[in-house]
């Protein structure tokens, strides 16, 4: 594999790392029929108008609310916002973030639809709280605003979700199969917690599944997120890469399948202010040598774990000790192997 060294072309065509205006708002949805059909129509219109203007957008639908995050030149952003405000598919628009800074979205469009057991009023409470803080001069990063609005916090320890020391996030992707999703659902059953279902999409791709579960363990709240590997290329995924303590790669042992997964993760890490530790889970220790060498060439930290069983309990017994040391993981060297067989 050639080391990844360049930002995506879209970012370079639209000013690279030059500062842009960044705006986020929340609004109540006025949607009839399938939300997926509505989001598809919004996407088609937005890509047609926003991409030529160099405006990047991420749109969330959750609990009867839209949250939209836009970045681009100030004048172009204002023109697009005038059209957005007049759209009859939403009302009661509230600005929850306004700043100027580097681009965080490196593609024209990302969509997220979240299915969770949360009342419309609960989402409204979070929107109003953020708007109140903004009105009183307290500004959060776009990622933090998105995270706070899209996360139904049910655990006492998860309330300060913007604080990385209180809320650990782990992303799991597989070279093949649905293993990460099975693991997340198993964790949900064991912990007695809801598994939240999400569907993501890019400007031209629809759609990518991602499920997560939140639970308390050893004094911190842990979010374990399963994502289809194609989701690693989405602008919204890349924007949140620095949030993850680890990205777990569930390897097949076949380089023809494992190397493309690694390449997707490495590309998502290019240009990030911070990168997660990569944690490979493979049926044999020999599968790690190539992964570790590629990680070293890309400047990424790689840890290794061995488990030749598809049993979720055994997999978690292997992974949990390595994830528990998440604050030290970025300083780790070598590829320790933790064997556990059925």
Image (cartoon, rainbow, N blue to C red):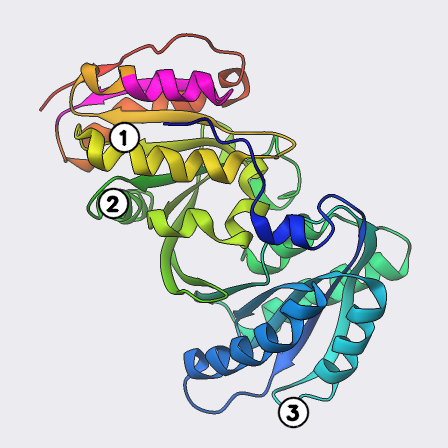
Question: Few, some or many C-alpha atoms within 10 Å of disc 2 (few <14, some 14-19, many ≥20)?
Answer: some
* Mark 1 → mark 3, Cα distance in angstroms: 47 Å
Which numbered tag is attached to residue 92? none
Q: Residue at x 23, y 47 (%)?
A: 182
Q: Looking at the rendering, which quadrant does residue 255 occupy? A: top left
Q: Where is residue 291 in the image (x, y as percent from the top left)?
A: 32, 22
Q: Mark 2 or mark 3, which is nearer to you? A: 3
**Residue 192 at least partly seen:** no
| Residue 291 highlighted magenta (yes or no) | yes
Q: Is residue 27 visible?
A: yes
Residue at coordinates 75% horizontally, 46% vertically from top-left?
102
Quadrant that contains the N terminus: top left
On the picture, is 247 further left or further right than 95? left
Q: How far apart are marks 2 and 1 (CA)?
A: 10 Å
List x then y, in percent, for residue 234. Answer: 48, 53
Vertical placement of 341 versus 6: above or below? above
Q: Helix, strand or loop at disc 3?
A: loop
Residue nearer the viewer, 229 or 6: 6
**Secondary structure under badge 2?**
helix
Discs 2, 1 touching: Cβ within 8 Å: yes
Q: Residue at x 79, y 64 (%)?
A: 131
How many labels, in total?
3
To which quarter of the image does residue 33 belong?
bottom left
Residue 296, image x, y percentages: 44, 16
Residue underneath mark 1: 316
Q: How crowded is mark 3: few (under 14 residues within 10 Å), some or many (20 or more)?
A: few
* In front of the other: 176 or 263: 263
Left or right: 135 as drawn, with respect to 260: right
321 vs 200: above or below: above
Q: Residues within 10 Å of mark 1 (few under 14, many from 20)?
A: some
**Residue carrying label 3:** 88
Q: Where is residue 274 in the image (x, y as percent from the top left)?
A: 61, 29
């Amino acid at each position: 594999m050639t080391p990844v060294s360049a930002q995506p072309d879209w970012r370079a065509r639209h000013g690279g790392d030059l500062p842009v205006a960044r705006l986020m708002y929340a609004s109540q949805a006025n949607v009839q029929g399938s939300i997926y059909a509505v989001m598809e129509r919004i996407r088609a219109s937005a890509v047609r108008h926003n991409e030529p203007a160099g405006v990047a957008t991420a749109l969330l639908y959750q609990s009867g609310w839209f949250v939209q995050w836009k970045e681009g030149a100030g004048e172009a952003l204002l023109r697009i916002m005038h059209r957005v405000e007049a759209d009859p598919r939403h009302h009661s628009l509230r600005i929850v973030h306004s700043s100027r800074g580097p681009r965080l979205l490196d593609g024209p469009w990302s969509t997220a639809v979240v299915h969770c057991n949360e009342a419309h009023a609960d989402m409204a409470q979070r929107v109003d709280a953020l708007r109140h803080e903004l009105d009183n001069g307290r500004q959060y990063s776009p990622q933090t605003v998105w995270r706070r609005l899209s996360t139904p916090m049910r655990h006492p320890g998860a309330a300060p979700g913007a604080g990385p020391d209180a809320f650990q996030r782990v992303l799991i992707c597989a070279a093949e199969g649905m293993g990460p999703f099975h693991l997340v659902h198993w964790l949900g059953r064991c912990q007695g917690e809801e598994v939240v279902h999400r569907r993501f999409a890019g400007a031209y791709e629809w759609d990518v599944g991602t499920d997560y579960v939140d639970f308390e363990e050893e004094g911190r709240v842990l979010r374990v997120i399963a994502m289809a590997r194609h989701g690693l290329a989405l602008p919204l995924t890349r924007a949140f890469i620095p949030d993850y303590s680890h990205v777990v790669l569930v390897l097949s042992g076949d380089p023809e399948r494992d190397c493309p997964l690694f390449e997707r993760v490495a590309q998502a890490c290019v240009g990030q202010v911070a990168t997660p530790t990569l944690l490979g889970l493979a049926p044999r220790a020999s599968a790690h040598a190539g992964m570790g060498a590629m990680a070293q060439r890309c400047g990424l930290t790689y840890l290794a774990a061995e488990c030749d069983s598809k049993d979720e309990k055994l997999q978690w017994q292997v992974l949990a000790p390595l994830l528990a040391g998440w604050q030290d993981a970025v300083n780790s060297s070598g590829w320790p192997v933790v064997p556990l067989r059925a």
